[in-house]
């Protein structure tokens, strides 16, 4: 049995913080599914993204300072909370894109928040053995996915796999989204340029202009029962009545 204490930091992963995260995430999910107002969803999204980024930055500062104030077990609890809130933000962004295409600031905020969360996750996984206070007890830290298991051994391997897959998937989705917007702008600019070019070509075509005194030869067909005779009559246009 381990003699290491598992008291969590109440300011960063206490019961009050966890309950507030759960409620905020659930309410945002319900709002995204039921609401048809972009302002309501975006307001809740900005609040949750700011909370997520602040939580990740606080965890990094308290865990990496010279005298850490959180343990490795605290960092695992933060990862649980941030992963749940992060997936809710991504799902809610899809609802915002459905309501309006003008969500550039919202998506940029989501990218910044995602980078901060992923940086925290990679830092915790990379420094798992020496992260936080009481590093001798990190080997007894426990992660729970359907059942408890060692967070430093099998949990660390599973964490690397999940975080790497999530990072790669999010990077591909974000790049595809931005590339789609860029290609759409290029197609729209080409559509605007093509009519201008065609109208310019039409304006450059020479238009025949006949002066009043210009002579033209007009063919007149004269048909007889046996033969057809074509006679060219010289016609003159005059301006005099």
Image (cartoon, rainbow, N blue to C red):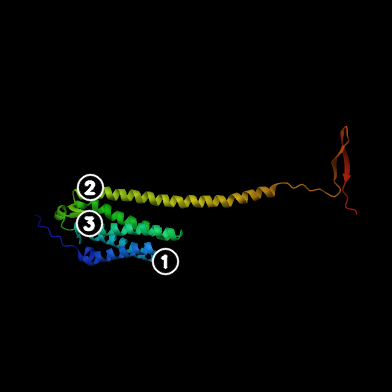
Label 2 vs label 1, nearer the camera? 1
CA separation in Å, label 2 and label 1: 41 Å
Which residue is at 54% across, 52% downward?
A: 189
- Is 161 positioned to the left or the right of 150 in the image? right
Element assignment for label 1 = helix
**Mark 3: few, some, or many residues within 10 Å (few <14, many ≥20)?**
many
Q: Is residue 177 visible?
A: yes
Q: Is 36 in front, or is 42?
A: 36
Q: Which residue in the structure is indicated by mark 2?
A: 157
Within the image, what quadrant is residue 98 found in? Answer: bottom left
Element assignment for label 2 = helix
Coordinates of residue 198 in the picture (x, y in percent): 63, 48
Of marks 3 and 2, which one's residue comes earlier in the chain? 3
Q: Is residue 112 visible?
A: no
Within the image, what quadrant is residue 121 found in? Answer: bottom left
Coordinates of residue 79 in the picture (x, y in percent): 25, 57
**Mark 2: few, some, or many residues within 10 Å (few <14, many ≥20)?**
few
Residue 205 vertical position relative to residue 116 in the rendered view, above or below: above
**Mark 1: few, some, or many residues within 10 Å (few <14, many ≥20)?**
few
Of marks 1 and 3, which one's residue comes earlier in the chain? 1
User: Which disc number belongs to residue 212?
Assistant: none
CB under 8 Å between discs 1 and 3: no
Q: Is 84 in front, or is 59?
A: 84
CA separation in Å, label 3 and label 2: 14 Å
User: Which disc number belongs to residue 76?
Assistant: 3
How many badges with numbers are in the image? 3
Which residue is at 21% across, 52% downward?
A: 128
Coordinates of residue 162 in the picture (x, y in percent): 28, 49
CB under 8 Å between discs 2 and 1: no
Q: The N terminus appears in which quarter of the rendering?
A: bottom left
Coordinates of residue 206 in the picture (x, y in percent): 73, 46
Q: Which residue in the structure is indicated by mark 1?
A: 39
């Amino acid at each position: 049995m381990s003699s290491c204490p598992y008291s969590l930091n109440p300011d960063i992963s206490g019961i009050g913080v966890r309950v507030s995260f759960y409620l905020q995430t659930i309410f945002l999910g319900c709002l995204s599914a039921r609401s048809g107002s972009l302002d309501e969803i975006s307001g809740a999204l900005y609040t949750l993204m700011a909370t997520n980024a602040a939580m990740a930055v606080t965890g990094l500062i308290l865990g990496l300072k010279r005298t850490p104030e959180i343990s490795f077990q605290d960092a695992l609890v933060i990862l649980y909370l941030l992963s749940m809130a992060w997936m809710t933000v991504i799902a809610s962004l899809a609802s915002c894109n459905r309501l309006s295409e003008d969500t550039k600031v919202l998506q940029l905020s989501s990218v910044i928040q995602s980078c901060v969360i992923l940086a925290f996750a990679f830092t915790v996984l990379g420094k798992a053995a020496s992260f936080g206070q009481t590093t001798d007890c990190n080997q007894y830290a426990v992660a729970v996915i359907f059942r408890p298991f060692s967070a430093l051994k099998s949990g660390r391997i599973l964490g690397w796999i999940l975080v790497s897959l999530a990072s790669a998937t999010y990077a591909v989705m974000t790049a595809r989204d931005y590339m789609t917007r860029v290609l759409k702008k290029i197609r729209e600019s080409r559509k605007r340029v093509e009519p201008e070019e065609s109208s310019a070509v039409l304006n450059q075509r020479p238009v025949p202009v006949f002066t009043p005194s210009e002579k033209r030869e007009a063919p007149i067909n004269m048909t007889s029962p046996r033969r057809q005779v074509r006679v060219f009559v010289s016609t003159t246009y005059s301006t005099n009545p």
